[in-house]
Amino acid sequence: MKKATYKKLVYRLSAVLLFYTVIVLALHYLEHNVPNTEMPTWQDALWYLVATITTVGYGDVYPVTYWGRTIGFVAMLSSLGIYGLVISQIANFMNTVREQRELGLNGTDFKNHVVIVGWNDFGKSVISHLVAAGKRVAVITKDRASIDSIREYYDSEQVYTLYTDYSNYEMLEKANIRHASMVFVNMNDDTEKLVYVINLKKHFSNLNYVVTLDNGNLKSTFQNAGVTYTICKNEISAKLMASYIFEPDVALFSEEILAYAQTDADYDIKQMKVTAGSSLVGAHYDKAYFDLKKICNVILVGLVKAKDGRHQFIKNPEGAILIEEGNYLVMMMDGAARAKLKRQFLVYEEA
């Protein structure tokens, strides 16, 4: 609830409380010393007032003087306004709670998730693949009309939506952005993306950032600005198109492995982390290659060494390279292999 609305409610309730306090004291003053009084104490006056404004009307206590009955008449009429006030405030409160939940103002506890700043058709396509891969996503949008469609299309357990201005960095905390594994800046203009990334890094400097570019010549500029991964959509489309022209079967397979394996028969490339207790810890890369192929029908294509938040990808390495705990194995596999990898080798895809 907004602070101004909260203050307004407190003022109204205080005024109502003061009004009925005056009525109770006035009734007690007028009634307590008269013959045959029903209100010798202020507690009796309070009991009469509560029974009156709640329309219970027990009839066990009532005023006997002219002015006492006049005040009782005022209390009866005022109860209509009180009911209206209470009902309206309850309705306003429920609407505020619902709106805050819908707009994401209550925040989220997602961790190691992907934060997407900006909503459009491309972002929708990206989210669909992330959700299919079991990744949680926080969408930040300043388009109020998109909130309902996002909430309708995606499960709130998988996709959290926050409605706010992108430059309101305090509000970005509600998306738990500091605990995100990646921040995808999904705006429509390359210049707008660059300016926003520079400003965003002033507040959240230790995060990984990814952007898509329309102009591939700006790649180095974005990398110098601190963007972790820059992707040129036109370059990817051009490469895939050329591949379809001169090697269409390879292009079809490339398109398949870039997406998440929806069924056990589908193939894709995954990056799996070697955890403590895995039989691969301390093993040579060559041996791991053959063991993974034999036991899980997985093709190992590279090794990633992670240090100080930076990843070094060694593609199909030669020589006596040892696999260490915390390394990532890049593997091509079908949908059925992931469970085998967890069971046999204790390697896991990070959530």
Image: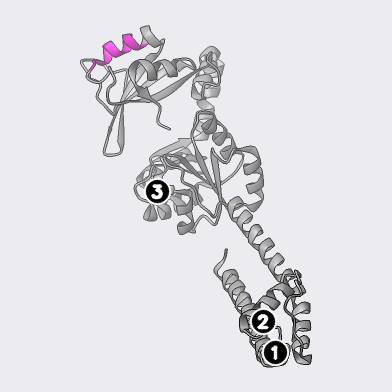
**Predominant SS of the magenta segment:** helix
**Is mark 2 in CB contact (under 8 Å) with mark 3?**
no
Q: What residue is disc 3 on? A: 178
Of the image marks 2 and 3, the number of the one nearer the N terminus:
2
Residue position for label 2: 45
Give the x, y percent position of residue 61. 72, 78
Task: Describe residue 184's horizontal placement relative to residue 163 as left or right.
Answer: left
In terms of depth relative to the viewer, which is nearer, 297 or 36? 36
Residues at marks 2 and 3, CA–CA distance in whole angstroms: 58 Å
Q: Is residue 287 shown in magenta?
A: yes
Q: Quadrant of the C terminus?
A: top left
Q: Nearer the viewer, residue 13 or 111?
A: 13
Residue 22: horizontal and vertical position, in percent?
64, 86
| Residue that mark 1 sits on | 31
Which residues are drawn in magenta?
A: 283-292
Q: Mark 3 vs mark 1: give the one in front.
A: 1
How far is the residue under mark 3 from the one under mark 1? 65 Å
For residue 288, which quarter of the picture? top left
> Quick check: is 236 in the magenta stretch?
no
- The kind of residue on which mark 3 rests is Arg
